[in-house]
Amino acid sequence: MHEQMPAGVTITEIVEETPSIRTFVFDREIAARPGQFVMVWVPGVDEVPMALSSPSSITVQKVGDATAALFAMHEGDRIGVRGPYGNGFAVSGRTLAVGGGVGASPLLPLVTAGLVDTFLLGARTASELLFADRIRDAVTLMMVATDDGTAGHHGFVTELISRVDLADFDRICVCGPEVMMAAVLAVLDREGCAERGLFSLHRYMKCGVGLCGSCCTDPHGLRVCRDGPVFSGDTLLDSEFGHYARDASGSRRRI
Amino acid sequence: MVALYPGPIEVGGIRLRNHLLLAAGILGTTGASLARILANGAGGVVTKSIGPSPKEGHPGPCLVVVDGGIINAMGLPNPSAAFVDELTALTGDPVIVSIFGGTPEEFRTVAGWFAGTASGLELNLSCPHAEGYGAAIGSDPALVEECTRAVASLGVPTWVKLTPNVADIAEIGAAAERGGADAIVAVNTVKAMRISTALRRPVLGNRFGGLSGKAIFPVAVRCVYDLYEACSIPIVGCGGVSTADNVVEMMMAGASAVEIGSAVIDDVGIFAAIADDLYSPDGIDAGEIVGCAHA
């Protein structure tokens, strides 16, 4: 395997997408398939996996030490990036995308590439809807749901699925909070089309290249960083998905 | 190339399905992952190192792929006693639990958690980047002997994994043997560092770490060769093994079996691939080549 030292990149632009989500644009394009991720090194803090929202950007919600440090950075600051890693979304035919919160980020490259026909976008509240304008402009149909009813359907994005005909779609690409994704998988399973779902998982990672085992999932031992992060719905049935995940020490934590 | 006769073997008190084991620290964090590697053709698996209390490990980057190898500084992340539950589905399988501690007493405590279930234990006396653990103990022959005795006296097959970062590895191997080790595993990673020229700082969160992979294969062969001269217990060769010919070479240096780790980066099915090249129904017994380079 060839050398993969982190590339040093300079942050050229920071976009406040929502009150809690920012896009960090850097001065290098990374050739990647939609849904692939990079390991982002915030010097002196940590390294964390982040989906690419474009060939030269990551879109981030503040959740831990590394993302908090990233939020404190400015244009002109330098970070390290290695990758792209993982499999990404492999779509063909008509595609439905379902995104919740910052989960719309890995789905954006699919939208940008013109590969999404219908997009169901959810968030806690109207101001937290991520990439709504860009998605609306690129897809045939976008529907919105907010938990508090400040935009679109008052409720969960999962509930919008009943308003589309799943038979119309060859692939259903999903990314968002795991509870939401598990609810989508339950719907697909009920409709007998779990295998058409493609779910982008988030797990604690250390190496990113399939060696350390931090992100292995039960019951098949599949590595989210290397065998994923995108898994078809049928592989996730009867798995840890939606139930638990492991933390940095490898201890199980309920989702 | 030499072909070996296939079938189960016994090394250092542990029955294995073949000569190819998964090395500690690689995909050994969960029971399901270990089961996957066994299903993929490994003769046995060594778990992630388990210690006396849960640890999250070092801040990242924890691993970087370099020319010819991998440098890592994970920092011994582990769930401690909770790991016992990971192994329930693997009862009866050739699973060796890697353990670490800061004192002989800690080693004995951790060993006790797995004494009933594991096929054997591998003492991590060799991690080069965790303060107070691993190589900090493994470079002192008296401590090595004491820690080995504390575990071996439990009656569980006890393997001791050594660091190559010492002046005389044979002296450490002899200490492990005196302590009652059933086998020696050689070697752990070689002290290493890379610096990001772009960011002008060491690339690993822990600054320094250990090198594994093809780059250290010659180092490992030399260590196995030296240990074979100094010790009479079996040696398990570890370090950069990625082909069947590497396995044969390790055996000629003195190894009775090998552990494979970094090569998994190219192919998670590496064990079956190597076994396919290594074994043949008309192959010879491994005993005919183990240590033959010393003649």
Image (cartoon, coloured by chain):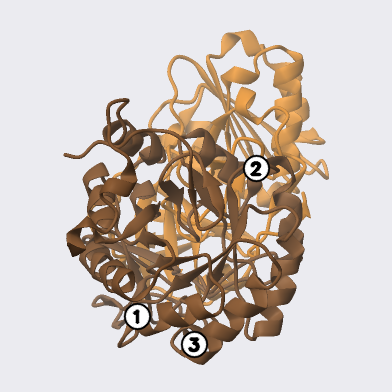
Q: Nearer the viewer, residue B39 or B156?
A: B156
Q: Quadrant of the C terminus of chain B?
A: bottom left
| Numbered label attached to residue B169 | 1
Of the two numbered discs 1 and 3 on the same chain, state the one appearing first in sequence: 3
In screen coordinates, is A255 left or right of B50? right
Which residue has dot 2 on it? Answer: A176
Q: Nearer the viewer, residue A103 or B10?
A: B10
x then y, percent, for residue B156 = 66, 62
Q: Look at discs 1 and 3 and give the one toward the viewer.
A: 1
Residue at the image position 38 percent from the left and 47 percent from the top: B264
The amino acid type found where label 2 is placed reads Gly
Residue A76 visible (yes or no) = no
x then y, percent, for residue A74 = 44, 76
SS type, badge 1: helix
Dot 2, how many residues are within 10 Å of its Cα: few (below 14), some (14-19), or many (20+)? many
- Which chain does tag 1 point to? B
Question: Dividing the picture into quarters, in which one does residue B193 lie?
Answer: bottom left
The amino acid type found where label 1 is placed reads Ile
Residue A172 visible (yes or no) = yes
SS type, badge 2: loop
Q: Look at discs 3 and 2 and give the one toward the viewer.
A: 3
Structural distance between the alpha carbons of marks 3 and 2: 44 Å
The amino acid type found where label 3 is placed reads Ala
Structural distance between the alpha carbons of marks 2 and 1: 51 Å
